Structure formats: C-alpha cells, structure tokens
Image (tube, helix red, strand yellow):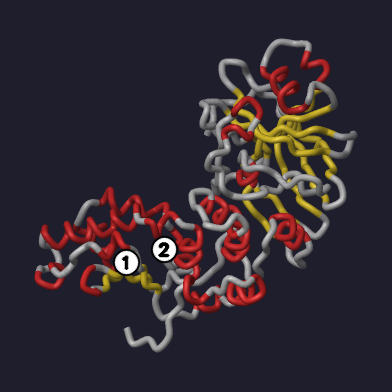
C-alpha cells in the first residue's frame, strides 16, 4: 500500500487517562488524513479471494466471491463495534478489506460490481451503511447529530464511557466524556444547530437533574432498555424524514414546532383510557401535562400538521411532558398510543426548551382534525 505508518487502536491508545485522552483527541485528523482504512477482521481474513484475479468481471465464481465478501462484512465483528463506526465514518474515503493471504479488496469496487452484475439485494443492504462511503457532495463531511445517534444505537463499546466520546467525535471535533458536558457545549455554540425533530421521538434515557436538558438523550444506545420504561415499554429509535419540521438548538436553548395536547393528570386519572395510564405511569397522577408529536409543514399555506411515527408496539409514538408551571415543562418519555382509541385533538405549538427553563408557548394555529394513520 506504500504506507510508512499505521494506526491501530489497541496499540496507539494508551490505558492511562491523560495520555488516552490526548490520543483520542487526535483520532479524527488521523482517520481523515489516512491514505486508506484497512479492515482487519478474522471473518474477512478467512475468505480466499484469489479467484478474483483469475476470472473475468462477469464470471459467476467471481461474483460469488464478492457477494460473500460483502455479506461477511455486514455481519462481522468489525461492523458491530462502536469505535469501528468512527473509523469507517472518518476514514471512508478509501476502505479496503484484508482477506486471506494478505489479499486486499476495495470495498467500493466490490459493491459497484455486485450492484451492477450480481445480487442487487445484497447491494441494497448497504444503503443503511452510509458511514462506509464518501458522498460525492460531502466527501469528509461530519455526520449529523441524529444520524450519528441512530447508527451508534446499534453498536457497543467495551468501556461504559466510550459511547459518548465516540458520539461527540462523529459529528464534532471535541471529545466529550459525559452527555451532560456534550449537550451543554452544543447549547453554547455560536451557530445554531438544526436537527430533525423526529430525533426526539425515542425512548433513550434523558439527562436528569439539569434544567433545560430533560429532552436531551443520555445515550444513543437503546439495546436492552425495555425494563427502563414505565410498563416495560419497548425501546424506540428516532425517525428522520426530509419533510418533517426541524428543531433548532440555539445559545438560549432548543426551539421545536410540534403538535400538542394539554391535559390535567388528576382529571385524566379518574377516567378510563390511555390518558389515565399515562397520568399514573409517567406523571404520578397529578399536575398539568402534555402529549407532543412532531409536526411537518404542508405548503403552500405552511400549515403545521402532526407527523405520526409508528412504534414497535404497533401504536403511534407520542412524547409525554409534565408542565411544571404555565410556561415550563419536563420531558418524561415516549408512549405507544394504541388503536382504536383516537389520540386527543392537537394544537400546533412552538416549544422553547431553554438552558435555564423550558418555555411552552401556544401558537395561534390550531389543528381541529383528528390525527390520521401513521406515516
């Protein structure tokens, strides 16, 4: 490959806290400046790819080797770890696969051949692995906050605190060791951060004890979280659609256009239905609260309409917030609203989640229609 130096995390990251942090601070420049990212995995190294040189491009035997190689990469140990996600995302300009007898195969060339001549269903699987390929218009561009969260939710790290470090390095240049410090720093950035409001509709645990950050996920990983939610609710990943409205994280806080239904817990707890279940399980049966769903804008009137995400339990995901006063709120989780009971009537609202307080302000626009089927 013509390289004089290499980076391997087990050899290049010390165990001592200070030196380890210094090494991690250099990871992004190292990966981005690398000539190639060579995937060193035992499953891939067991594959004999010598037949690639002996066959013409459309040979069935050659295509079988490439298809086997691509499938093996998807299920390999390398492709389920959190640190390797960062390696791929920052070093994706030229990813190479190391196979048996030190043979090296270009990932992008293998995928191009299989998508053109081989099993298209294998190539389609790679549409969910954007971290492996350099976009023509983005190159080495950073991942977004919500994209990095969604990808990391399916990965694991050997150290408990590493997930946040990797998360912060995927979409930024400064490593953070705690979600509190990461989200606090994001709020202080001079430029606004815009992300899809579907990113909020997840059952990831939220930051506790810091006013204004009750909405912020404590970690992207959702694996094994069923018992952490009231009533054993299933874990849900946030959605991301181009037509959905966005949230804006500013120096003052987070602003979010959504659709809301306000209710009184004490009143709802005395009635039958799912509002009663929510009032008791999420809100201890008292206080003013609200159900929230993301909104999208329908042109040309710029009407805000509810965007409903279908949950793992078969219902529609709604966020639950407690209104601690007329103008402040606290995030309490997400809930699967089950059919056939209709979700209560919604009002479009602009929610400002400030660093020091959470201000909820109702807009003039109202949604008089019931929610339709999930999109």
Q: Badge 1, how many Cα within 10 Å: few under 14, some, many 20+?
A: many
Whether residue 248 sits left or right of residue 311 in the image: it is right
How packed mark 2 is, by other alpha carbons closer than 10 Å (few <14, some 14-19, many 20 or more), is many
- Residue holding disc 1: 107
Residue occupying image coordinates x 55% and y 54%: 147
Residue placed at 60% from the left, 36% from the top?
A: 307
Location of the N terminus (image quadrant) = bottom left
- The percent position of residue 185, horizontal first and vertical second, equals 75, 62
Residue at image location 64% in from the left, 53% down from the top: 195
Give yes or no for contact between labels 1 and 2 (Cβ–Cβ under 8 Å): yes
Q: Quadrant of residue 249?
A: bottom right
Q: Picture coordinates of residue 326 (x, y %)?
A: 89, 34
Along the viewing direction, whichever of 332 and 158 lies nearer the viewer: 158
Q: How much space separates mark 1 and mark 2, taking CA atoms?
A: 9 Å
Q: Earlier in the sequence, mark 1 or mark 2?
A: 1
Classify mark 1: helix, strand or loop: helix
Q: Which residue is mark 2?
A: 132
Whether 135 is drawn above or below 374: the answer is below
């Amino acid at each position: 490959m013509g390289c004089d130096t290499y980076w391997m995390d087990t050899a290049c990251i010390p165990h001592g806290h200070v030196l380890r942090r210094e090494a991690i601070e250099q990871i992004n420049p190292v990966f981005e400046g690398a000539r190639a990212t060579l995937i060193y995995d035992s499953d891939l190294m067991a594959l004999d790819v010598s037949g690639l040189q002996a066959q013409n491009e459309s040979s069935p035997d050659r295509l079988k080797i490439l298809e086997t190689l691509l499938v093996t990469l998807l299920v390999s140990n390398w492709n389920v770890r959190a640190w390797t996600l960062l390696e791929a995302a920052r070093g994706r300009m030229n990813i190479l696969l190391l196979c048996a007898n030190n043979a090296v195969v270009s990932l992008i060339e293998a995928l191009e051949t299989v998508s053109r001549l081989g099993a298209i269903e294998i190539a389609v699987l790679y549409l969910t692995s954007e971290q492996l390929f350099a976009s023509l218009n983005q190159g080495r561009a950073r991942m977004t906050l919500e994209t990095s969260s969604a990808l990391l939710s399916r990965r694991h790290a050997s150290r408990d605190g590493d997930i946040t470090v990797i998360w912060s390095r995927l979409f930024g240049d400064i490593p953070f060791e705690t979600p509190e410090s990461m989200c606090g720093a994001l709020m202080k950035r001079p430029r606004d951060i815009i992300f899809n409001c579907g990113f909020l509709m997840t059952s990831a645990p939220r930051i506790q004890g810091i006013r204004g950050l009750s909405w912020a996920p404590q970690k992207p990983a959702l694996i094994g979280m069923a018992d952490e939610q009231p009533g054993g609710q299933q874990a849900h990943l946030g959605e991301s659609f181009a037509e959905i409205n966005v949230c804006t994280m500013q120096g003052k806080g987070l602003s979010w256009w959504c659709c809301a239904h306000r209710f009184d817990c004490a009143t709802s707890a005395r009635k039958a239905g799912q509002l009663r279940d929510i009032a008791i399980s999420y809100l201890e049966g008292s206080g003013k609260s609200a159900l929230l769903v993301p909104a999208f804008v329908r042109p040309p009137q710029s009407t805000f309409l509810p965007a409903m995400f279908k949950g793992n339990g078969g219902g529609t995901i709604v966020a639950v917030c407690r209104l601690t006063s007329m103008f402040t709120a606290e995030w309490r989780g997400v809930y699967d609203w089950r059919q056939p009971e209709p979700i209560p009537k919604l009002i479009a609202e602009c929610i400002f989640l400030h660093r020091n307080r959470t201000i909820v302000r109702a807009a003039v626009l109202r949604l008089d229609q019931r929610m339709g089927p999930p999109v």
